[in-house]
Amino acid sequence: MVLTSKISSKDQITLPKGIKKLLNVQEGNVVIFEKQNDKIVIKSARTLRDFKGLLKNINTEENHGEIRKKTKKSVGKRVAQGGKRQKGCYRY
C-alpha cells in the first residue's frame, strides 16, 4: 500500500483514511513518529485510558512502590503464560 499526504503551510500532514484505520486512531488520538534506520515509523500512542481496570484489585492505600511491584508481577505472569506483550509506546 502506498499512500501520500501533502505538508501544509503549518508543517502539518493529514493521515489518509487507510492509515488511520490500520493504526486504529481517530480525531484527538496521539501518534508517534519514530526514526528506525532510514525510515520513519508511525505508531499509535498508548494512554492511561488503555490501562483502565489493570489495577482494579490492588489496595489503594498501599504506597507507590508496592503498587509498582504488584503491577510488574501481574504483567510478568501474563507474559510467562504466553500472553501477548503489548507493542508500542506508552504515554502518561
Image (cartoon, helix red, strand yellow):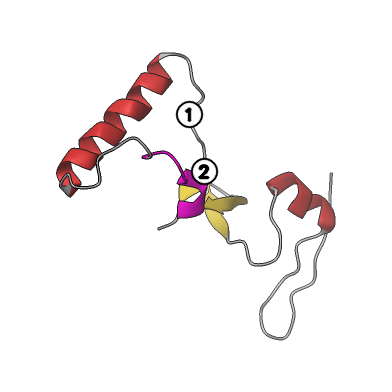
- Position of the C terminus, as image quadrant, is bottom left
Residue 22 in the figure: left or right of residue 37: right
Give the percent coordinates (x, y) of residue 44. 60, 51
> Does residue 49 appear in the picture of this structure?
yes
Label 1: few (<14), some (14–19) or many (≥20) C-alpha neighbours in 10 Å: few
CA–CA distance in space, label 1 to label 2: 10 Å
For the magenta stretch, what is the residue range?
47-55
Which secondary structure lies at badge 1? loop
The residue lying toward the viewer, choosing from 73 and 57, is 57
The residue lying toward the viewer, choosing from 19 and 26, is 26
The residue pinned by badge 2 equals: 88
Residue found at x 29% / y 37%: 58
- From the viewer's perspective, is residue 81 above or below residue 71? above
- Position of the N terminus, as image quadrant, is top right
- From the viewer's perspective, is residue 87 above or below residue 38? above
Mark on residue 85?
1
Residue 31 in the figure: left or right of residue 75: right
- From the viewer's perspective, is residue 53 above or below residue 30? above
Q: Amino acid at mark 2?
A: Gly
Quarter assignment of residue 32: bottom right
Give the percent coordinates (x, y) of residue 57. 34, 35
Check residue 9 for magenta coloring: no
Mark on residue 14?
none
Q: Residue furthest top?
A: 81
> Does residue 47 appear in the picture of this structure?
no
Q: Amino acid at mark 1?
A: Arg
Q: Are marks 1 and 2 in contact (CB under 8 Å)?
A: no
Give the percent coordinates (x, y) of residue 20. 75, 54
